[in-house]
Image (cartoon, coloured by chain):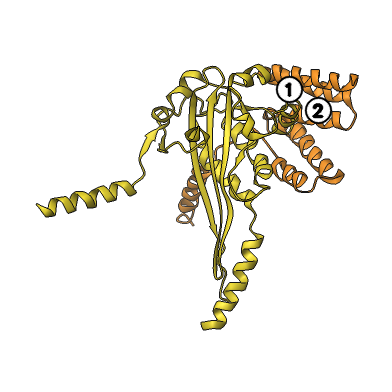
Chain colours: A yellow, B orange
Amino acid sequence: MKKPLTIILALGGIFAGCTQHVTKHEFAPNMYEERPIAILVLPPINKSTAADAKEYYTTTVAEPLTNMGYYVFPMEVVNEVLKQEGLFDTETMFNVPPGKFKEYFGADAVMYVTILEWNTQYLVTSGSVNVKIASELRSTTTGEVLWFYDDRVSVSTTGETGGATGLAGLLVQAVTTAIKTAATDYVPLARQANAKILLALPYGKYNKEYDKDRQMKIEKKKQIGPKEEE
Amino acid sequence: MRTPFLPITALIVLLAGCMPPQTPFYWGDYSVSLYNYKKTPDDKTFAEHKQSLIVIITESPNKPLPVPPGIYAEYGYMLILEGKEQEGLEYMDKEVTLYPESRIFVERLKRAFKKGDES
């Protein structure tokens, strides 16, 4: 009786490691139902240790999101309006009922972005730069979550030994790792993370693929956006 | 001479299949100039970002593609910041003509600027 259990456990282990795939329509049926056009991207919540992550991240969203086929309100101008409404603090904004953004901006949906990682892991001779983003889209009509997704992009900055071996090699590697890690910019990684996340979003009306992507397979994700903490 | 021709044709067909599909909008250097402006906000980076908006506005019709969402409004906003209010408001109107879904937003902006003038 012991053997089958081991096999089942092993199988369970294998399946847990696998990523599940679903169609876009199965993952986000309400997107195809409501068909939002105009998206308001709010300034992100920054849960990383980098204070400047929030400001730099916002420069990377409009381009991929419009290319997916959506009208995106110009974020630089939106920030001005939000300030005038006394809504500059991101944390306060998360408590504003989504319907208010329909009233203020005419938005069909609001995108809430959380920056989870924007950091450098640096272990003397090896290093990596990491960016992890979670996005969530909520309807301004019903307040419901229409779609959510997340992804992490990581680049190794481990330096070269320059052909040297032994202790000398390690020293060279430590120095080149330090240089590479310091020079790697986060913004290209944020762009990559956005690209990966937004490809899982159903296409909007300004993209030729609009409404033709219901059967497109994407990796199934669990919701890790701001909502779980409410 | 006939044999190399086929692989080359095959290669071209393959490469064509790998080409990224054309995106619906042309964004030029937008994200780079905006990033530079955010990193070091001064007259130079402001002018450079404004210049990338101008390039997007003038180049899009040549692609031919519509000017991307938000570009007319952002350009208009930059003109207003420079004190060219009339011209700025004209670009705000262009945004609404091209993207009617921006109407409520642009009207709110215009009201905000008028309020700013009175105070």
- Residue at image location 73% in from the left, 27% down from the top: A86
Q: Subunit of mark 1?
A: B
Amino acid under disc 1: Glu
Dot placed on the residue nearer the N-terminal end, 1 or 2: 2
Q: How far across and down, in percent of the image, does residue A223 sit?
A: 45, 36
Q: Quadrant of residue A122?
A: bottom right
* Labelled pair 1, 2 in contact (Cβ < 8 Å): yes
CA–CA distance in space, label 1 to label 2: 9 Å
Q: Subunit of mark 2?
A: B
Mark 1 surroundings within 10 Å by alpha-carbon count, few (fewer than 14), some (14 through 19), many (20 or more): many
Q: How far across and down, in percent of the image, does residue A59 sit?
A: 68, 41
Q: Nearer the viewer, residue B43 or B25?
A: B43
- Quadrant the C terminus of chain B occupies: top right
Q: How far across and down, in percent of the image, does residue A136 sit?
A: 52, 32
Left or right placement of residue B95 versus residue B46 in this view: left
A194 versus A184 height, above or below: above
Left or right placement of residue A64 versus residue A13 in this view: right
B39 versus A88 height, above or below: below
Mark 2 surroundings within 10 Å by alpha-carbon count, few (fewer than 14), some (14 through 19), many (20 or more): many
A188 versus A217 height, above or below: below
Q: Secondary structure at mark 2?
A: helix
- Residue at image location 78% in from the left, 40% down from the top: B49
For the image shown, how many numbered marks are present on the structure? 2
Amino acid under disc 2: Gly
Q: Which mark is residue B95?
A: 1
Q: Which mark is residue A127?
A: none
Left or right placement of residue B76 versus residue B100 in this view: right
Q: Nearer the viewer, residue A46 or A120?
A: A46
Q: Secondary structure at mark 1?
A: helix
Q: Is residue A163 visible?
A: no
Q: Which mark is residue B76?
A: 2
